[in-house]
Image: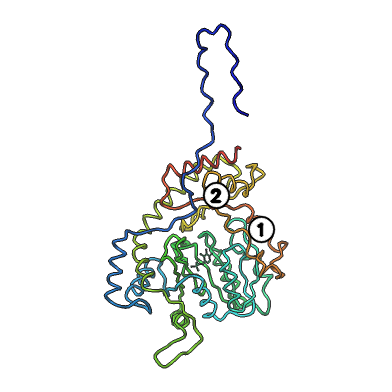
């Protein structure tokens, strides 16, 4: 390349009229800093430090201190749970839930989730049995559950993926008929409701994750919500080594306790949750307006009777209409410093620890297999300005056009 040498001008007289500048390149500018899918809510440090002063003067750092008690109460109210138990993370909570309802043998679950979902079954010596999902909600398809039930089946582990609730009534009916336990992974569903009923009120137990990537968080943390007070007592024993009192250890428990430091952080983060939801709802509307221009980009919006958890903003890419695959769009957006995520690709059923299972064969999971190749989570958190959302959408327009 390089510019061609200028031809000497005849006559050597007056300069020609200036050429018009080249058309502005249509390519949007990349972001200076990477834009991630999420960013943890960080409360004003002063409030957190104030709570730490209380913790310091109490000299009590763990084992259900004042912060823990206050957060358990505050969250029970916020989530309208009958009974809530805090945990050091959601995964340990889910492991304890499986123990508490005594799952064994086989449990039917979804392949379209985070690794923790099938892993908690493995940690309980339970074989995960993968059932296909519905194309709309991307959650366990009740019609796919029943054919997989055997004499060894003891439960159903559903995931309210991206905060969209499972078909809880249909799952409940199957569980009652076959005498199965139902546990929900609601890691994405903080604050979700179905017909005004809180998400933590369905099934035998519901797990919430309070990891830093979740809308409400305690840096690391989680909780179990249950309706049965006896089950709550059992869960609280299991999360504290099975210690009933000074002289009695009544079951082989684990250490699932949330510390005072995490609980103190959670109490401050909880103050920000309503404003964060409002901001995220606005960003979701902006995305929806802009992305409506692309027939091949469909949005996952919850049905009208569902209160959105606003945890993720998910799109599905129909490559036959956009002309670009999900993977190509993901790669092109990286060039603009936009870090989207392919949650949940690969399917859990593709992990080396599960792919040998009969239920893990792709032929058993056609919907999940297709969806996993189409979904993309866009940056979605209250720290994104309107301008940033428009720039992300400009980059999507460009990536699809180019
Ligand atoms: C985040 C997440 C978990 C794990 O929660 P931790 O609190 O990180 O242990 C489990 N399931 C799903 C679907 C998740 O997104």
358 vs 116, left or right, is: right
**Extreme-bottom residue of the structure:** 247
Which residue appears at 44% of the width and 67% of the height?
A: 220
Q: Report if residue 142 is visible in the image.
A: yes
Q: Quadrant of residue 116?
A: bottom right
Mark 2 surroundings: few (<14), some (14-19) or many (≥20) residues within 10 A: some
Q: Position of residue 260 (x, y in %)?
A: 36, 73
Q: Secondary structure at mark 2?
A: strand
Residue tagged 2: 299
Instruction: Say if mark 2 contacts mark 1, CB within 8 Å.
Output: no
Residue tagged 1: 367
Ligand 1 within 8 angstroms of badge 1 C-beta: no
Q: Position of residue 314 (x, y in %)?
A: 54, 52
Tell me if residue 92 comes above or below residue 394 in the rendering.
below
Q: Position of residue 308 (x, y in %)?
A: 47, 57
Q: Secondary structure at mark 1?
A: helix
Which residue appears at 61% of the width and 69% of the height?
A: 109
N-term-proximal mark, 2 vs 1: 2
Q: Position of residue 82 (x, y in %)?
A: 41, 73
75 vs 1, left or right, is: left
Closer to the camera in the image, 236 or 177: 236
Q: Report if residue 300 is visible in the image.
A: no
Which residue appears at 51% of the width and 12% of the height?
A: 15
Quadrant (top left/top right/bottom left/bottom right) for the N terminus = top right
341 vs 57, left or right, is: right
How does the figure colour the protein chain or chains?
rainbow
Mark 1 surroundings: few (<14), some (14-19) or many (≥20) residues within 10 A: some
């Amino acid at each position: 390349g390089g510019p061609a040498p200028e031809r000497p001008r005849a006559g050597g007289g007056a300069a020609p009229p200036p050429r018009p500048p080249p058309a502005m390149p249509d390519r949007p500018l990349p972001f200076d800093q990477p834009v991630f899918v999420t960013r943890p809510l960080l409360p004003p440090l002063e409030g957190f430090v104030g709570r730490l002063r209380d913790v310091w003067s109490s000299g009590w750092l763990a084992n259900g201190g004042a912060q823990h008690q206050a957060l358990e109460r505050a969250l029970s109210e916020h989530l309208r749970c009958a009974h809530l138990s805090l945990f050091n993370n959601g995964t340990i909570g889910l492991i304890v839930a499986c123990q508490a309802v005594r799952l064994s043998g086989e449990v039917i679950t979804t392949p379209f989730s985070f690794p923790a979902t099938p892993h908690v079954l493995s940690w309980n010596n339970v074989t995960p049995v993968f059932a296909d999902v519905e194309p709309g909600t991307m959650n366990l398809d009740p019609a796919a559950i029943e054919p997989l039930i055997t004499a060894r089946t003891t439960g159903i582990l559903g995931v309210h993926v991206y905060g969209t609730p499972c078909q809880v009534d249909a799952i409940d009916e199957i569980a009652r008929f076959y005498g199965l336990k139902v546990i929900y992974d609601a890691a994405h569903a903080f604050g979700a409701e179905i017909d005004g009923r809180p998400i933590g009120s369905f099934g035998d137990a519901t797990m919430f994750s309070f990891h830093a990537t979740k809308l409400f968080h305690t840096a690391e943390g989680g909780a179990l919500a249950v309706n049965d007070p006896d089950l709550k007592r059992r869960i609280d024993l299991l999360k504290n080594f099975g210690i009933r009192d000074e002289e009695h250890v009544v079951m082989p428990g684990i250490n699932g306790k949330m510390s005072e430091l995490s609980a103190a952080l959670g109490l401050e983060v909880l103050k920000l949750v309503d404003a964060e939801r409002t901001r995220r709802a606005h960003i979701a509307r902006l995305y929806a307006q802009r992305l409506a221009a692309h027939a091949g980009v469909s949005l996952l919006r919850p049905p009208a009777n569902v209160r959105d958890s606003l945890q993720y903003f998910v799109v599905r890419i129909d490559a036959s209409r956009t002309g670009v695959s999900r993977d190509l769009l993901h790669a092109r957006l990286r060039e603009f410093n936009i870090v989207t995520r392919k949650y949940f690709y690969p399917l859990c059923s593709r992990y080396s620890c599960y792919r040998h299972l009969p239920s893990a064969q792709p032929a058993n999971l056609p919907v999940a297999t297709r969806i996993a190749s189409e979904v993309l989570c866009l940056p979605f958190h209250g720290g994104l300005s309107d301008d940033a959302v428009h720039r992300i959408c400009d980059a999507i327009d460009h990536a699809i056009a180019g």
